[in-house]
Image (cartoon, rainbow, N blue to C red):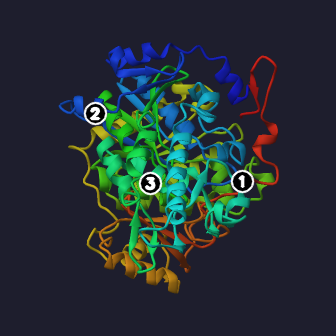
Amino acid sequence: MKTDIEIAQEAQMLPIEQIAQGLGLDPQSISPYGRYKAKLDHRLVARLEQKPDGKVILVTAISPTPAGEGKTTTSVGLADALHRLGRRVMLCLREPSLGPVFGVKGGAAGGGYAQVVPMEDINLHFTGDLHAIGAANNLLAAMVDNHIFQGNRLGIDPRRVTWHRCVDMNDRQLRDLVDGLGGKTNGTPREDAFDITVASEVMAVFCLASDLADLKERLGRIVVGWTYAGEPVTAAQLGAAGAMTALLKDAFDPNLVQTLEHTPALIHGGPFANIAHGCNSVIATRLSRKLADYVVTEAGFGADLGAEKFLDIKCRLSGIRPSAVVVVVTLRALKHHGGCPKQALGEANVDFVRAGLPNLARHIENMQNFGLPVVVALNAFPTDTEAERNEVTALCERMGVPCALSEVFAKGGAGGEQLAQQVLAVIDAQAGTPALQLTYGDEQPLAEKVRAVCRKVYRADGVEFSAAAQKALASYEQLGYGHCPVCIAKTQYSFSDNPKLLAAPTGFTVQVRDVRLSAGAGFIVVLCGAIMTMPGLPKVPAAEQIDVDTNGKITGLF
């Protein structure tokens, strides 16, 4: 079979104006970026306010493994399948980060015959949104240090500046550093750090804002550090919010592209799910609901991370409610959770599949605990056997959830029709949108919110907070942030904070080492275990395989 990039490069794309016309959009509503990309005016959401909202289908997965699960591929294929079945559908995804593209994962635009295109553009600079987010973030950082240098009218304590610079690349060298060296004219020496752009608060603010006014207000609320007197200092106090909004103005318009089968797709915003809230922008999801009857969207990593945050953070703050959840699973991933060595994942072994099933079961239970109907998508691999598949279908039967074989990687939308029909069936069986049962209430103390997620979703015995974390939580509550939801940053590979505890571990305690305030985003970031907000590159980064020839043709991007 051809590589992903070969399939994408051979695709016959339609002019983006034609895709927009199919959505009923006039030329004034779009700003083309070349032939096959366009920005849609975010104000369309307000203009279409009277239109009924389409039904949201949330695609998530079991805990990720090196074997791969295919969540984005399944999302694309499901949207194409619904399109083939005659439904008005919109695909709504996150923008890839350059860190994973050049790091471990490679491209993040789907795979096989279930891709969004132009694939190279989407995976690389796209329309420049992430660069704009990084520029806004670093403008604020520059203004913080300049304020200190120019007399420090606000009395910012350089030892308590919490605002980090960012770059959209995995670069461990930037995790901890000292800057402002080299004499008085070079600023004030202090400890500093970089985060990856997709883990920045500006990215979270960008993805949760409802319009430009809300974006500016949220940016102004960002707390950049603390005064010598222990008072918070905000971006608004520094006079930065307006300029930051100006940098983000064009980026705030969602990006319109298409799948290989010409299904319209909005790709906008891309916070990581293991260290941020893992969902595409609220504005893109809302616009998709106005332009289509069904919206297929995804949440990053496993359901314990992306889906939990989609529901407990994005849905809580936006009012968006999904009508169904698709949990993606592969036999290879189940075997990994069951203890199978990586080199043997392609070999038939029912016992390893059976041993890994508790991971799938727990994710299904978690989604059901939110009050949502679940469909399991068994993402097919050529090495799968009928006996192994039967183990998955038997589990689903016991749990009362439908299971559909997904062959979208090899067959595109045609390979997802069974899945699409199952999803439509569970949606049609409901009287309306199911009532969402959140993990915790707004009024609960912050520590109890953390415990609720750890106990109900991860199945931890308890939570241990470091002294610094306890002090920070108490301070945030005293300052009036106790109503905020919590965004837990932990390893994606396990329900626990230990990446080595696979399947469905029990008897563990989650270690909370630090807590950060994201006042602009409106949530509290809880750092667990060894998770870092700046990843590093692997021993053999994907970048080593990526190249471009003299004609400008890119190779190696999956």
Q: Residue at x 40, y 67 (%)?
A: 233
- Give the number of the disc on residue 307: 3
- Circle nearer the N terminus (3, 2): 2
Q: Which residue is mark 2?
A: 45
Residue type of the residue flagged with mark 3 = Ala
- Give the number of the disc on residue 349: 1
Q: Position of residue 11 (x, y in %)?
A: 62, 17
- Give the number of the disc on residue 535: none
Nearest to viewer (mark 2 / mark 1): 2
Residue type of the residue flagged with mark 1 = Asn
Closest to the observer, 464 or 78: 464
Nearest to viewer (mark 3 / mark 2): 2
Q: Secondary structure at mark 3?
A: helix
Badge 1 density bin: few <14, some 14–19, many ≥20, Cα 10 Å:
some
Q: Position of residue 79 (x, y in %)?
A: 45, 31
Vertical position of residue 488 compared to residue 332: above or below: below
Q: Secondary structure at mark 2?
A: helix
Badge 3 density bin: few <14, some 14–19, many ≥20, Cα 10 Å:
many
3D distance between C-alphas at marks 2 and 1: 50 Å
Q: Secondary structure at mark 1?
A: loop
Q: Say whether marks 2 and 1 touch (CB < 8 Å).
A: no
3D distance between C-alphas at marks 3 and 1: 29 Å
Residue type of the residue flagged with mark 2 = Val
- Circle nearer the N terminus (2, 1): 2
